[in-house]
Image: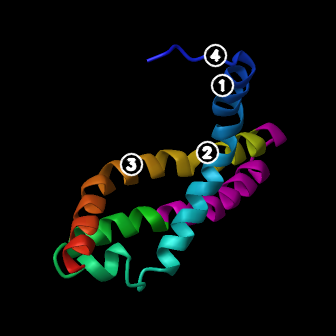
Amino acid sequence: MEPKEIDFVKVVLKTLELIIIKPFTLPYKIYKNALIALSNSNADNSEESNLSTDFPLYIWLISIFNALIVLAYPIGIIMAIKGASGYFGSFGLFIGILIITYFSPLYIGLIREFLQISLKVLLYLKIISKK
């Protein structure tokens, strides 16, 4: 195996993308995926339609995390407005709550994905066994 040349410009650009750009675009992608998962819950290849008879409680738990991700932004915006208009409210508090709210799908999505790993394996095995 021959050694390959390293393109340091690509390495630096990819590193900057992963460190700077990805953390700011990932919460939106997680939020969008939760919306899609909830709206397509009756599709033929969804977890809910394939595994709900076998694992109803587990499917419900994963769906709860999707619902929490979807509710994170509206609840966060309401909390930011209430926090800014309170006795100790300020513009800095408003912005701080909005920042925490924007990144909250990352935390909730991480927990959901840890719980969803075994469910995805079961789903793919069931889809393969039907073919």
Identity of the amino acid at label 3? Ile
* 69 inside magenta stretch: yes
Question: Given this view, does label 3 or label 4 mark the residue nearer the observer?
Answer: 4
Q: Would you call the spot at circle 2 few (<14 residues within 10 Å), some (14-19), or many (20 or more)?
A: some
Identity of the amino acid at label 2? Phe
The residue at the point 65 percent across, 55 percent down is 28
The residue at the point 48 percent across, 71 percent down is 37
Main SS of residues in magenta: helix
Identity of the amino acid at label 1? Thr
The residue at the point 22 percent across, 76 percent down is 56
Left or right: 115 with respect to 68? Answer: left
Marked residue nearer the N-terminal end (4 or 2): 4
Question: Given this view, does label 3 or label 1 mark the residue nearer the observer?
Answer: 1
Mark identifier at residue 103: 2
- Nearer-the-camera pick, 72 or 25: 25
Mark identifier at residue 6: 4
Marked residue nearer the N-terminal end (3 or 2): 2
Question: Given this view, does label 1 or label 2 mark the residue nearer the observer?
Answer: 1
Which stretch did the figure color magenta? 68-92
> Does dot 1 land on a helix, a strand or a loop?
helix
Mark 1, residue position: 15
